[in-house]
Image: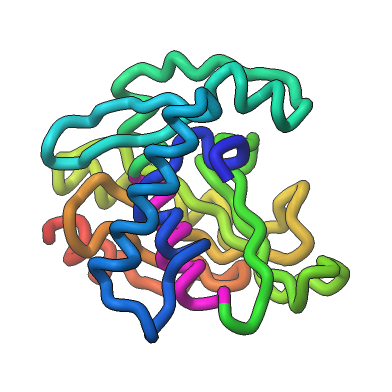
Amino acid sequence: MAYSFKVLLRDNVIEALYRDDRRRAKSQVDMSNKTLRDVVSKGFLQTHSMGHEYGNLYAMDELGFDYLGVKPYPTDFGRRELIKFYGVNRVFSTLCYKYRKDYTLEWSTDCGIGDAAAIVWEDSTRRKALKSYVIEFVKTNFRQDRALEIEEIQKRYAGKEVEGLPTKPSVIAATIDREDFELLVVEDGKECVSRQEIDKWAAS
């Protein structure tokens, strides 16, 4: 997961590996924390601290690349990159919760398609794609500028196919906000929110 995500959030691990209605929430958190501590202690992952508000992020370390037998990429991410990865990778947790029981979710961060991209497959054979997503991180924090940036994102993708994705994408704008951090602006290639709705969300 860390290789495709660039940085992992604990919530990503919970949703992908440990989410189970039969387990208490604390148990899911404890199991995820233990897994992350173990792989860090063995040298497969390294920790990036984002402070108390956002917690730790986990990136590939040298031994992790060697273990997977893949070409390393730089992992000395600056704070802006970490914030962007944090913002878009939270969307994975939302989509994973929505699709994991019945379908297969493929995810990649910083892959050249938006800031992250996802494909929902009918099953693990990945022969039939049901849906594609592009996730774009909203960089500005000012209300008016944020609304304009989201509008530009919407216009960029509405009605268009995206190379590398099997279907016309749904597009999610993501922020660093603690709550209400994502907005679906394009659904299967079609605009699905108005300027008024974008303004209202940008101001929240």
In depth, the one of 148 and 114 nearer the eye is 114
Q: Position of residue 33 (x, y in %)?
A: 33, 49
Locate the N terminus and report the quarter of the image it occupies. Answer: top right
Whether residue 176 can be seen here: yes
Count of marks overlaid on the render: 0
- Residue 201, position as x, y percentages in the image: 21, 63
- Determine if residue 150 is in view: no
State the image coordinates of residue 193 (x, y, percent, origin top left).
38, 72
Dominant SS type (magenta): helix
Q: Residue at x 30, y 60 (%)?
A: 29
* Residue at 36%, 27% in the rendered image: 47
Q: Is residue 173 above or below residue 184?
A: above
Q: Which residues are magenta?
A: 87-100
Colour pattern of the rendering: rainbow
> Residue at the spot x=51%, y=23% of the render?
43
Q: Quadrant of the C terminus?
A: bottom left
The verdict on residue 14 being magenta is no
Q: Position of residue 129 (x, y in %)?
A: 77, 71
| Residue nearest the observer in this picture, 38 or 173 | 38
Is residue 96 a member of the stretch shown in magenta?
Answer: yes
Tell me: 65 left or right of 57. right
152 lies left or right of 79: right
Q: Is residue 28 above or below residue 77?
A: below
Instruction: Examine the image and state in which quarter residue 50 appears.
Output: top left
Comparing 144 with 75, the one in front is 75
- Determine which quarter of the picture holds residue 200: bottom left
Q: Residue at x 51, y 62 (%)?
A: 16
